[in-house]
């Protein structure tokens, strides 16, 4: 009898030991004592890798940061500052070259092109939309161009004066003016000459600046428009502080475009005429209130869209390559030696779809 009781007691103790060991094993499968059905473990978020810089356009935007906005009469401008200048070359601007006589722009006998001769010892940069005064008709550069030292190239242009094709003067000069961003966008998309003339005629009616020869330059020289631009320039004087390499421009709460350079020094040669062109654009629109201010996050998203854009590379008349940016961002760039010299970004539809 005692033997049976002893065996029963041993059996009970053995069963308790096995159950305890099993429970300990099951608890070890669930950290912090959690069991199925009771506060399941939250999956850890996996951080996404930063965008990979695969081209010179993305590299320029990744190297830029957005400064504090400056507002004046419906125009909001964000400065763009480079963490470091990517383009260390020195350039001659068209205005510099005309001023010191080292650049000469001549008629070729073809409406859609001019010849630019660079007699200096450094490369000359011409920005798409810069206005050339003289010849048989005033023209604007159809694309960015880089003219090597001691070189002459033929450059595509658009006529920006419809009612004149005369005169013995073969040379051109500069009055430091730049066409509207809408005209530059048309040129970037390869618009027809008639489309450009149509845009100029529409602007003339809106601004009240109609001229006998439908001359775009007359917009800048009309007294009322000149006074308006002077007022904006005075308003923006405090803005020009520090080394910038570009601008993002907003009109009444809408991002109109961006101009970004690989060199802050080259941008400084063109900054005032660039802002003037966006001021002239703003004068096309009545003051709209209220409107939502664009914030820094909106600007950053606008710029960062280039990382997802399609890039199409092409040739240029001079040095470097042209780059069409299309898709999530739309614009045109000029690169040389793997570095972007200048990038323009526009709002609107894809350039490749036009």
Image: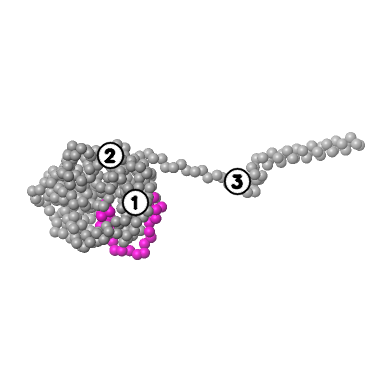
Q: How many marks?
A: 3
Instruction: Tell me if residue 182 is in the magenta stretch.
Output: no
Residue range (magenta)? 274-300
Q: Please rate how many residues cluster around mark 2, counting C-alpha atoms within 10 Å: few if below 14, some from 14 to 19, many from 20.
A: few
Image coordinates of residue 321 in percent, x first then y, are: 27, 39
Residue 274 numbered mark, or none: none
Q: Residues within 10 Å of mark 3 (few under 14, many from 20)?
A: few
At a point 26% along the width and 38% down the height, the residue shown is 320
Q: Quadrant of residue 253?
A: bottom left
Q: Quadrant of the N terminus?
A: top right
Q: The residue tagged with tag 3: helix, strand or loop? A: loop
- Seen at 24% across and 46% down, the residue is 127
Contact between labelled residues 1 and 3, with CB atoms less than 8 Å apart: no
Residue occupied by mark 2: 89
- Residue positioned most to the right: 1
From where the camera sits, is residue 332 visible?
Answer: no
**Mark drawn on residue 79:** 1
Which of labels 3 and 1 is toward the front?
Answer: 1
| Residue at 9% in and 50% down | 167
Percent of width and height locating residue 152: 17, 39
Taking the image as shown, residue 37 lies to the left or right of residue 354, namely right
N-terminal of the pair, mark 3 or mark 1, is: 3
Q: Nearer the viewer, residue 208 or 93?
A: 93
List the residue tagged with mark 3. 41
């Amino acid at each position: 009898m005692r033997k049976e009781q002893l065996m029963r007691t041993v059996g009970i103790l053995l069963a308790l030991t096995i159950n305890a060991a099993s429970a300990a094993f099951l608890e070890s499968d669930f950290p912090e004592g959690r069991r199925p059905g009771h506060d399941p473990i939250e999956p850890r978020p996996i951080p996404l890798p930063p965008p990979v810089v695969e081209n010179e356009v993305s590299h320029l935007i990744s190297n830029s940061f957005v400064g504090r906005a400056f507002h004046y009469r419906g125009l909001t401008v964000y400065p763009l500052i480079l963490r470091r200048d990517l383009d260390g070359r020195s350039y001659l601007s068209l205005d510099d070259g005309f001023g010191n006589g080292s650049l000469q722009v001549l008629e070729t006998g073809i409406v859609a092109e001019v010849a630019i001769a660079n007699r200096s010892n450094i490369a000359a940069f011409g920005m798409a939309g810069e206005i050339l005064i003289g010849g048989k008709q005033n023209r604007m550069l159809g694309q960015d161009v880089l003219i090597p030292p001691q070189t002459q190239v033929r450059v595509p242009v658009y006529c920006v004066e419809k009612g004149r094709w005369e005169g013995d003067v073969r040379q051109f000069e500069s009055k430091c003016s730049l066409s509207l961003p809408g005209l530059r966008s048309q040129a970037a998309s390869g618009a027809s000459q008639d489309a450009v003339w149509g845009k100029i005629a529409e602007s003339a009616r809106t601004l009240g600046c109609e001229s006998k020869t439908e001359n775009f330059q007359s917009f800048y020289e009309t007294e009322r428009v000149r006074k308006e631009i002077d007022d904006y320039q005075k308003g923006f004087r405090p803005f020009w502080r520090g080394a910038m390499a570009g601008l993002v421009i907003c009109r009444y709460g809408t991002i109109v475009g961006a101009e970004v350079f690989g060199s802050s020094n080259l941008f400084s040669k063109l900054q005032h005429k660039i802002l003037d062109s966006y001021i002239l654009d703003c004068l096309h629109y009545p003051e709209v209130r209220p409107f939502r201010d664009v914030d820094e996050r909106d600007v950053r998203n606008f710029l960062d869209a280039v990382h997802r854009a399609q890039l199409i590379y092409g040739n240029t008349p001079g040095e470097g390559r042209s780059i069409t940016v299309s898709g999530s961002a739309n614009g045109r760039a000029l690169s040389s030696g793997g570095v972007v010299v200048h990038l323009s970004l526009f709002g609107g539809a894809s350039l490749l779809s036009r």
